[in-house]
Image (cartoon, helix red, strand yellow):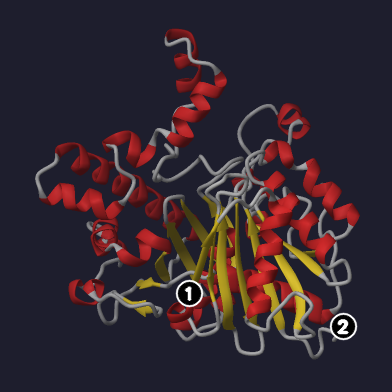
Amino acid sequence: MTGPATATRVLVLNSGSSSVKYRLLDMADGTRLAAGLVERIGEETSRVSHTPPAGEAGRRERGGPVPDHAAALKAVAEELARDGLGLDSPGLAAIGHRVVHGGMRFSAPTVITDEVLGEIERLVPLAPLHNPANLTGIRTARALRPDLPQVAVFDTAFHTTMPEYAARYAIDVETADAHRIRRYGFHGTSHAFVSRRAAALLGRAPEQVNVIVLHLGNGASASAVRGGRCVDTSMGLTPLEGLVMGTRSGDVDPAVTFHLRRVAGMSVDDVDVLLNKRSGLVGLCGDNDMREIRRRIEDGDEPARLAFEIYVHRLKKYIGAYYAVLGRVDAVVFTAGVGENSAQVREAAVAGLEGLGIAVDADLNAVRSDVPRLISPGRARVAVAVVPTDEELEIAGQTFALVAAGRGGVDRGA
């Protein structure tokens, strides 16, 4: 196999419980060579969608059963091979895997060994819906290419720089430590990527700027980034804490769980489903698509209007809180599906914050673009920006840098 000094391609795999999302990039210039999705794994109606180097014009789709992740990765390998980019290609330097939870053990991208796999498995109780699927993808990929460096990039890693006073919950210390209860944060690859791109947009080094990043998709999170390091983030032990999301409640009084158990007879699992899948925007108005919510508001729909106001109110509270945490803010940055595409959300989120130096220019905010851009008025004290996120590129970049440097491992104690 050609070594990483000459091989520059990285395959990024994001293995879910019933899907595998992938992207192949050439890290010589960050070019996307191919991408795709295998979905509904284990069902008769499985589907493989593949976008080749030619782009959407050459997009291929095929159906038929994909019984397991091994078959899914075989399908990925077959599609890449049709483009001359197979897993046996000498240009492939490494495979980078998204892993949702790294706990406090992993604070950086890590070359995968049997020991590392064991540690990721030990963290399954903290991410029971995600880490098992991530592990399945890793094991399958290692079986296909046991000779190739494979790297785990953790959603939680960027947030391990939070000080203890931001990461600790105010509960009994012995209980918290015994069960690893603390605030870990998620969407870390996005927050890392976007905060760096925002600094570049301002023409400054990441170490010189303080940024509030608002990752607003179906899942949503905020982070306070001081000098390139996360000092606070809205998600906690799980991705449920924080902002109002598509189907998740975000912040809620913990006693709601006890109340529902006592007066409604709901089980722990019932409450889990309620807060994670039947709350947020969909719980408030029946829709979790911001475009549809805005359409309904324009038609005079009151539940949609109230859902939007609750969503924005929570968002504004976090902007203010993180302004206080940072002390000085150089930029507020919107990213992900809603953050990048909803001018109404951006406008409403900063409305009334002019006294803090935060505002948007109506004309700039209305522009649709897929490039990083400022939407604040000229000479604004705090820049407001839209920076498209690219988590796959971030994972590929971290993977390639690690393999090229010939290092890897566990960074911090449990």
Name the residue nearer the viewer: 90 or 359. Answer: 90
Residue bearing mark 1: 59
Q: What residue is at 71 percent from the left and 63 percent from the top?
A: 74
Q: Is residue 227 visible?
A: no
Q: What residue is at 48 percent from the left and 15 percent from the top?
A: 266
| Disc 2 secondary structure class | loop
Where in the figure is residue 246, as x and y percent of width and height?
39, 45
Task: Please tell me which of labels 2 and 1 falls first in the chain.
Answer: 2
Where in the figure is residue 248, as x and y percent of width and height?
44, 39
Relative vertical location of residue 337 with respect to residue 93 in this rendering, above or below: above
Residue bearing mark 2: 1
Position of residue 141 in the picture relative to residue 188 (left or right): right
Position of residue 406 in the picture relative to residue 106 (left or right): right
Q: What residue is at 56 percent from the left and 72 percent from the top?
A: 35
If the image is split into quadrants, where does the N terminus sit?
Answer: bottom right
Name the residue nearer the viewer: 143 or 404. Answer: 143
Q: CA distance from mark 2 to mark 1?
A: 29 Å
Instruction: Please tell me in which quadrant of the rendered image residue 379 appears.
Output: bottom left
Residue type at the position of mark 2: Met
| Disc 1 secondary structure class | loop
